[in-house]
Image (cartoon, grey):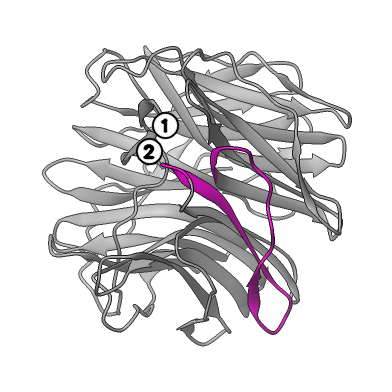
Amino acid sequence: MKRLSIVIFPSIAVVALAALFLRGWAEAPVATVAQFTRGSSVCGVWSTVASPNVGTSTNFLNGVAAISAKNVWAVGTEGNGNGGFTLVEHWAGTQWKVVASPNVHGSTSDSLSGVAAVAANNIWAVGNYNDASNSQQTLIEHWNGTNWSIVPSPSKGQLYGVTALAANNVWAVGSFAGMSTNGYQTLIEHWNGTSWSIVPSPGAGSGQLYGVTALAANNVWAVGNVADTNTIQTLIEHWNGSSWSVVSSSGPGLATNTLNGVAAISANNIWAVGDDSSSTAPSATFAPLVEHWNGSSWRIVTSHLQGTSDFLSGIAAVSASNLWAVGDYRNGIDPSGPYFTLIEHWNGTSWSGVKSPSPGSVASVLGAAARVPATRSVWTVGYIQDSISQTLTEFYC
């Protein structure tokens, strides 16, 4: 999801483009706003699928997880102009429906940004809420097969990404406002089957983690960015079963380099996507950034440039020769857009742009993608902007 908050680091002000968090409340029955419908059941093309909107001003989907073709979850935020509420939607095979999700009592705004599934009755969603004093706190919710509930989490800050290995092994990543710096510091939390706890994470400077993926209990990867006094550089961290460490990576941008999403195929085949820029000006142009781990090092891989500014926010892996990266792009230098959906495909040799619907007049943004297990089908979610923002879901088979 496009990062719209302005993050100020030592000696550098950057428009940090990552998930847009407000908040959502949901309860069925609701009026489904179904302007954007899947126009074709023919496989081989991306098409929109109708999804409900309950907020009168704000509707965003930030994360998606697929358990099966008839069991997909998407999370985000909705609001009425006076704060936000958590938004959870579920696909049971024929249509998306809103599922009731809780908000923190006394909060001024709640939002969910990422979701991961252990099983059909064991799903985790993460995000953040603002308490009564407007201090940002982590938010974690759990689906037990019947309802969503809030699970205590131990930190101030915000969680962007989550990945699940087992019922007693779930990781969430994000950031919190650092007391010793002018920016943010990385935040990593772990579920051991009983409670969430903070796990120390390295990072010299002001760092944030946006995406996380896991291959095994001793092989977990997290990506984001880290700032010093002059630039923002990619940040990649690895868990070896006992501790997190920074793994060397870099980006071509002279000013900013960020990794937003990560997907793993095998221990020696991992992909991360984001964006980079050589300027911090409001009209700065961005290029898509794609990096690959071959088992020994991360290297930049040439990606398709669709517009004058391209942002990649999420990635889903079907196989070594079938990966999808999603985001958005604009054609001019005006940072207000309009923005269009961006989808790129890896065929085992190169990345190329793939046509995708962009139904919003002001913006059409994709923030996350997930493969349906044991199939080649992929879901991607985000939002569109006209007079208000509305949810956006797209599907490929």
Q: Earlier in the sequence, mark 2 or mark 1?
A: 2
Label 1 neighbour load within 10 Å: few <14, some 14-19, many 20+? some
Q: Which residue is mark 2?
A: 2
Residue type highlighted by circle 1: Pro
Find the magenta span and give its range: 181-208
Percent from the top left, x then y, of residue 321? 76, 29
Regarding residue 324, the answer to whether it shows in the image is yes
Where residue 182 sits, quadrant-wise, is top left
The foreground one among 308 and 321 is: 308
- Foreground disc of the pair 2, 1: 1
Give the answer, above or below, for where 29 lies relative to 76: below
Percent from the top left, x then y, of residue 235? 63, 35
Judge left or right: residue 34 versus residue 308: left
Q: Which residue is mark 1?
A: 10
Label 2 neighbour load within 10 Å: few <14, some 14-19, many 20+? many
Asked which secondary structure carries label 1, the reply is loop
Percent from the top left, x then y, of residue 83? 19, 64
Judge left or right: residue 335 versus residue 151: left
Asked which secondary structure carries label 2, the reply is loop
